Amino acid sequence: MPTISRRTWLKAAGLASISAPQIGGASPIELPLNTKKIPSSGEAIPVIGIGTNRYGVGDDLEAMQPLKAVLETFAAAGRGVIDTAPLYRNSESVLGQLIKELGLSDHFFIATKCDVEGSDATRDQLASSEQKLHSGTLDLVAVHNLKHWREQLPILHETKQAKQIRYVGITTSRDRQYEEFKEVLATQELDFMQINYSLADRDAEPLLQLAAEKGVAVMINLPFGRGKLFDAVQGQELPDWAAEFDADSWGQFFLKYVVSHPAVTCAIPGTTKVRHMQDNLKAAQGRLPNAEQRKKMAQFYDSL
């Protein structure tokens, strides 16, 4: 059986060569995107967003153009989440520049992070993020990988009270931080948590349940398991029963598993190509797997 890459599936689905739509023009998005509500406010956001760890391309204008096309495609689908961080090289500056060029400064839900020590340094970092992203109010600021969280969370809450940010959260992408993460989630007032979760890595499920009990929105990073999922299905046909929840590519299969978890609010796959953006957005359309289908998906993956 021949190897089936994500690109092969996208080409077969007719998405590999479609260029980004112009805002206000025809869009390839044919159905409304599924949304979920942020428990602390009731605000609804699309279940698929964008991670930008690879947007730190410096001043390379040529490298920025594909990223601009991704943002334009994403904007045509609605007000979705874009997740970034000061740690991602100059991703904040690149995003701010591209969003400003597109005239979409108020169109996205912008999430960034803080990771410095000291109250003055934290306030300076927040001001820097706001300036780089050309955002008067940051939608979400989270403590990055729990760094200095005891010091930073009070500052973030103070900044939220001043209406300079809208939501407060914490993040991790490391299983070894789960015990400390559980402590923070159980004892602190939070709007969001961000954590790694995929078919290849389900160890976060107890924390997802705790978040549901605490009324905390859940943003998922690494929904493709750092590429492990695509590696695992090389040479595998997409199961016929994936059509039962409107998945017609492996990327959609993997993302629909993540966002169908009752506690998950959205996923933020890293996205730098239009064809991947379009495929990811299809994971936010149509039916999502139910509990029995999720179990079947997990059993299928575990059997590979």
Image (cartoon, rainbow, N blue to C red):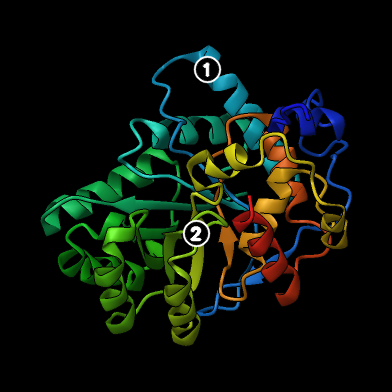
Q: Where in the figure is residue 126, as x and y percent of width and height?
A: 29, 51
Residue positioned 29% across, 72% down in the render: 157
Tag 2: Cα neighbours inside 10 Å, few (<14), some, or many (≥20)? many
Mark identifier at residue 197: 2
Viewer-nearest of labels 2 and 1? 2
Q: Amino acid at mark 1?
A: Ala
- 261 relative to 140 in the view: left or right: right
- Nearer to the camera, 201 or 110: 201
Residue positioned 85% across, 58% down in the render: 241
Q: Where in the figure is residue 33, as x and y percent of width and height?
A: 77, 58
Mark identifier at residue 126: none
- Nearer to the camera, 131 or 21: 21
Q: Is residue 79 among the parts visible in the rendering?
A: no
Height in image: 114 above or below 13? below
Whether tag 2 and tag 1 are in contact, CB under 8 A, the answer is no
Q: Quadrant of residue 34?
A: bottom right
Q: Where in the figure is residue 278, as x and y percent of width and height?
A: 74, 39
Which quadrant, please, contains the N terminus?
top right
Q: Quadrant of residue 118?
A: bottom left
- 288 relative to 135 in the view: left or right: right
**Is label 2 in a helix, a strand or a loop?**
loop
- 170 relative to 81 in the view: left or right: left
Q: Where in the figure is residue 151, as x and y percent of width and height?
A: 15, 66
Height in image: 37 above or below 145? below
**Is label 1 in a helix, a strand or a loop?**
helix
Mark identifier at residue 63: 1
